[in-house]
Amino acid sequence: MRNFVVEIADAYGVTAEEILGDDRTRNLVAARQELMLVLSEETELSMLEIGGLINRHRTTVIQGIKSARRRRERRTRQIGAAVEWFIANAPDGLAIIVKKRMGEVDISIVNEDRLENGDWTINVPAHKAEERVRKLLEDVTK
């Protein structure tokens, strides 16, 4: 479990101790819920066992997993919108590479032949993906 906690803490910019603590700030709640989801997907632990590990009631774990799934689905839609916008507006010869991570996305705009002008890469929160792709494409095509 420790590896999951550390990985999620790094992705959310918090500490493992904060995830396992009582603070209820938005970012920590999201990180904690992501941990619940990952533990449910990657282990054979029951909701009761997950709750015991992170000092939460099993019903809190169930609700946290639902919230984390909804958050993932929303991020996927937001990233999809950015890619669709890029496809509709990018000049010929440019391609987009998207690497999705917890809470964020790495977006690279590259020359299809990868020989001219190098790559342009940004790391952004998923909810800002479309806005930042537009800005990045403006910068690349100047």
Image: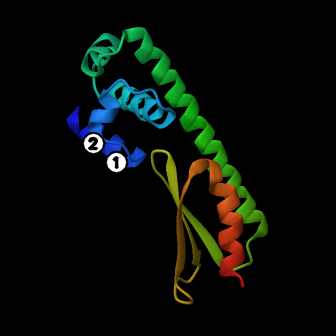
Q: Is residue 97 left or right of residue 38?
A: right
Q: Nearer the viewer, residue 1 or 113?
A: 1
Circle on res. 82:
none
Query: Residue at position x 27%, y 34% from top?
Result: 17
Q: Which residue is mark 1?
A: 10
Q: Which residue is mark 2?
A: 6
Query: Residue at position x 55%, y 57% from top?
Result: 124
Q: Nearer the viewer, residue 123 or 37?
A: 123
- For residue 71, say whether it is visible: yes
Q: Position of residue 93 (x, y in %)?
A: 67, 80
Q: Is residue 58 left or right of residue 104?
A: left
> For the residue marked with disc 1, what is the amino acid?
Asp
Q: Quadrant of the C terminus?
A: bottom right
Q: Measured along the vertical axis of the image, is residue 48 above or below residue 134?
A: above
Q: Measured along the vertical axis of the image, is residue 97 above or below residue 77?
A: below
Look at the numbered disc 2 and give the secondary structure of its residue: helix
Gap in angstroms between the C-alphas marked 1 and 2 = 6 Å
Q: Position of residue 15 (x, y in %)?
A: 31, 41
Most distant residue in the left direction = 2
> For the residue marked with disc 2, what is the amino acid?
Val
Q: Are marks 1 and 2 in contact (CB under 8 Å)?
A: yes
Q: Position of residue 45 (x, y in %)?
A: 28, 19
User: How many other residues sit within 10 Å of disc 1, few (<14), some (14-19) or many (≥20)?
Assistant: some
Quadrant assignment, res 74: top right
Q: Measured along the vertical axis of the image, is residue 102 above or below residue 88?
A: above
